């Protein structure tokens, strides 16, 4: 007999095993058929020589290195690359699921044109030549009509060189509008921008920390680079080395990270800033803070007067007057003696590091809470030292000039992706005539997805690059199929756990199974088709040639090393710190060949104490009192003031503080907090059966959405375990299965991210998308979203 898979069989066999039979619907007859097929001599198996190839995982921001086993031309196994400094041979479930991504039956085959309407699309397969010709005609028309600025590119969060290529394309074309989908790190990055004046990604040296204070960061559930974090976690537990790092997890819910932490501090939801400032009060009042660092490297700690003689409140006075221990205890529900003990432990176990505020990978936290948490790092002297908070080093050879439009660039349409729908609908400051979605699905992945859906209908020309149809590409005019990581050239940069400059590069491991392309190849082909300045700015035949040119810049820097073993890493770091550089290559071509073979290049030695690089504020210091926020507040006050001089700004708007939390009502008595599981982190992965099966394992829940609810709350509202319920907010309602969970806080319920797609693989179109009912407010000064939870009611369906 011939052993073949259709979608239903693929799903059932992927679940396999007696333990999952009842939950998955796999019958004993189905398992017998599988066994018979495997035993039959006619089963077709890959043939050919065995080989191994390096690659890079792109299913999460970690960018782990891969080793792929091939039989002939077929990839049959994925494991970690032991030479890659991020994962050192380790791999999380998402990396293992890469084979299901490659062989997925629902992948797009060819470019498609919408022959119908946005409301009723009819997809027709076309050639790449026709697709690129259509895009070229549209963009030429806009440029010739003086509307080049009306082109917008919306990208998913990613590291590596593809963002640079997109900015270079837009700069040559004449548009400043490159936007990136929001992430949970946005609030943390805002804190660094306000307090350190930097836009480079933050990094945490977790492996060398002695005390980790995590404010809601899901360290063991998909944050940053999951494997790198788990490696650091293992090092914290290495008692044989003579050290033990304490992990304190601060969050309302008993998460997997909280369960594995040394201590779980359950606080009232949304009061992270108050707790951080209460710890700051204890550090200051007991003289436990790093007085030398505060004196030499900070601004705004004490009260101060500006050049006009105007008095301003300092951080110390704010904390001493408004965040005393008993007051903070009343706000957070955390005992005062616990707050004091945490401060003392952090001060006595340095280097200590504080992380947060953060909710999920797609929901930014509160910027003021992030500033409060980051202020603890300043008080502890944990900025730019081993075991503390670092700033990622730039890749050598980068040239930002090529990312700027020649002459005077046009003004950007908006500053963030969240503002884009309103700008499209209002046509202010100008209209959007063309939108390119690069592996981005804002309709599904953003809180204002409904607004995005309306906005996409108003854009005359929408192009989506994606491997699967999704909720946003369903509204596009053209859909261009993208290759998986194993089918094309890939590159990644350092994740949040790594501060060192890093460039991982991998060639295709297997031939593309369908008529697909890497987004970089598609963009370069479009540049050649447009000609003129765009083609001249990007004279590369393909993305491989583009990567090759960037490696030339790395070689010219005469620094760093190719990925190697732990012993080689130690040797390279020792040599560089001693002022020596002894590379394994002598030409750029040799570097290129070694990068392809071993997985990449990096700078193993981090340069500490480069304060001009780390602090780029107007004061040249860490700013407890953010002068950038003060300037923004003054501009806002002037814009709002109708006559005379603008009103004086409130100093608290420029300092870390606890924002006012929305109050419950009798109509919506419960608080909804969205949670995240590693298999579906970032809202991605639901189309892969392996990841669906292992999501929600703490409740033995999988393949559908669930609502975590505390037993007391369930009893109060008459909800039984396993019952289907409606979860309703002022925005709408979704349906999920109630699961009683003692790790939830009374009065608080939780829905997981990643479920509820309306379009795409049938396996991803299951459950409910909690972002459809989440409410979000914007801070009037920073303009950033404030996600403090959404009040809901729960009742039986």
Image (cartoon, rainbow, N blue to C red):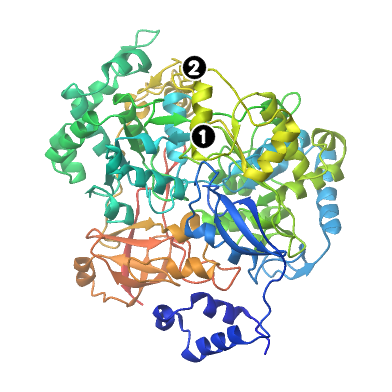
Is mark 1 in CB contact (under 8 Å) with mark 2? no
| Residue under numbered circle 2 | 612
Q: Secondary structure at mark 1?
A: helix
Quadrant of the rendered structure where residue 737 is? bottom left
Q: Is residue 684 visible?
A: no
- Point out which mark residue 37 bears: none
Tell me where residue 653 appears, x and y as whole percent: 36, 29
Q: Nearer the viewer, residue 368 or 601?
A: 601
Q: Is residue 681 visible?
A: yes
So how many labels did they put on this image? 2
- Residue 481 vertical position relative to residue 639 in the rendered view, above or below: below
| Residue under numbered circle 1 | 569
Callout 2 crowding tier (Cα within 10 Å): few <14, some 14–19, many ≥20:
few
Tell me where residue 231 appears, x and y as whole percent: 41, 46
Q: Is residue 86 left or right of residue 492?
A: left
- Residue 761 vertical position relative to residue 355 in the rendered view, above or below: below
Q: Secondary structure at mark 2?
A: helix
Quadrant of the rendered structure where residue 141 is? top right
For image coordinates 34% across by 61% down, the residue present is: 750
């Amino acid at each position: 007999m011939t052993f073949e898979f259709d979608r239903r069989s693929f799903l059932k066999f992927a679940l396999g095993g007696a333990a999952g039979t009842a939950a998955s619907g796999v019958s004993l007859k189905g398992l017998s058929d599988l066994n018979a097929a495997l035993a039959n001599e006619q089963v077709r198996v890959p043939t050919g020589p065995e080989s191994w190839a390096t690659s890079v995982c792109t299913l999460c921001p970690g960018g782990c290195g891969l080793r792929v086993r091939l039989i002939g031309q077929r990839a049959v196994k994925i494991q970690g690359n032991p030479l890659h400094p991020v994962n050192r041979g380790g791999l999380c479930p998402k990396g293992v699921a890469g084979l299901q991504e490659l062989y997925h039956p629902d992948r797009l085959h060819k470019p498609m044109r919408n022959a119908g309407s946005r409301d009723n699309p009819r997809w027709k397969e076309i050639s790449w030549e026709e697709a690129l010709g259509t895009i070229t005609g549209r963009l030429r028309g806009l440029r010739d009509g003086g509307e080049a600025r009306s082109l917008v590119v919306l990208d998913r969060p990613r590291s590596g060189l593809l963002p640079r290529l997109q900015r270079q394309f837009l700069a040559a074309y004449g548009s400043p509008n490159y936007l990136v989908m929001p992430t949970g790190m946005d609030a943390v990055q805002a804190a660094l921008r306000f307090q350190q004046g930097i836009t480079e990604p933050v990094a945490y040296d977790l492996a060398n920390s002695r005390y980790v204070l995590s404010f809601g960061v899901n360290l063991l559930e998909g944050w940053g680079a999951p494997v790198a974090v788990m490696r650091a976690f293992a090092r914290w537990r290495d008692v044989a080395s003579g050290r033990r790092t304490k992990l304190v997890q601060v969050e309302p819910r008993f998460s997997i990270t909280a369960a594995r932490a040394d201590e779980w501090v359950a606080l009232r939801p949304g009061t992270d800033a108050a707790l951080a400032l209460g710890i700051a009060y204890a550090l200051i009042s007991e003289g436990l803070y790093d007085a030398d660092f505060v004196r030499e490297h900070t601004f705004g700690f004490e009260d101060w007067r500006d050049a006009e003689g105007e008095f301003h409140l300092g951080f110390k006075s704010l904390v001493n007057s408004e965040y005393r221990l008993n007051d903070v205890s009343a706000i957070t529900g955390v005992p005062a003696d616990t707050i004091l003990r945490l401060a003392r432990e952090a001060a006595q176990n340095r280097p200590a590091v504080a992380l947060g505020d953060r909710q999920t990978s797609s929901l930014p936290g509160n910027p003021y809470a992030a500033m409060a948490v980051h202020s603890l790092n300043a008080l502890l002297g944990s900025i730019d030292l081993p075991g503390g908070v670092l700033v990622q080093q730039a890749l050598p050879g980068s040239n930002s000039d090529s990312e700027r439009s020649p002459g005077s660039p046009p003004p950007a349409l908006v500053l963030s992706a969240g503002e884009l729908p309103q700008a499209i609908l209002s046509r202010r400051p100008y209209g959007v005539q063309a939108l390119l979605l690069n592996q981005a699905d804002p309709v599904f992945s953003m809180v204002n997805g409904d607004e995005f859906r309306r906005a996409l209908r108003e854009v005359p020309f929408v192009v989506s690059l994606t491997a699967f149809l999704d909720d946003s590409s369903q509204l596009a005019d053209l859909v261009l199929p993208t290759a998986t990581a194993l089918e094309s050239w890939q590159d990644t940069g350092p994740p949040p756990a790594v501060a060192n400059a890093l460039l991982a590069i991998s060639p295709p491991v297997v031939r593309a199974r369908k008529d697909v392309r890497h987004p970089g190849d598609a963009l370069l082909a479009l540049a050649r088709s447009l000609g003129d300045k765009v083609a001249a700015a990007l004279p590369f035949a393909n993305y491989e040639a583009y990567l090759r040119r960037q490696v030339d810049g790395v070689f010219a820097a005469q620094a760093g090393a190719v990925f190697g073993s732990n012993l080689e890493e130690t040797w390279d770091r020792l040599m560089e710190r001693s002022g020596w550089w002894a590379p394994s290559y002598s030409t750029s071509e040799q570097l290129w060949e070694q990068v392809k073979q071993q997985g990449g290049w990096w700078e193993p030695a981090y340069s500490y104490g480069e304060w001009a690089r780390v602090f780029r504020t107007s004061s040249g210091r860490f700013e407890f009192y953010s002068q950038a926020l003060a300037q923004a507040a003054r501009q806002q006050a002037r814009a709002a003031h109708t006559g005379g001089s603008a009103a004086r700004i409130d100093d608290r708007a420029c300092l870390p503080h606890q924002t006012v939390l929305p109050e419950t009502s009798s109509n919506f008595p419960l608080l909804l907090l969205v949670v995240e599981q590693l298999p579906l982190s970032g809202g991605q992965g639901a189309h892969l059966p392996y990841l669906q099966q292992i999501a929600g394992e703490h409740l033995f829940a999988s393949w559908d959405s669930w609502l975590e609810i505390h037993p007391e709350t369930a009893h109060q509202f008459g909800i039984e375990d396993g019952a289907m319920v409606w979860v309703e907010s002022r925005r709408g309602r979704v349906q999920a299965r109630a699961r009683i969970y003692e790790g939830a806080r009374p009065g608080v319920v939780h829905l997981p991210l990643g479920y509820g797609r309306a379009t795409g693989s049938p396996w991803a179109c299951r459950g409910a998308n909690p972002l459809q009912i989440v409410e979000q407010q914007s801070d009037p000064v920073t303009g950033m979203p404030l996600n403090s939870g959404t009040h809901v009611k729960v009742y039986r369906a």
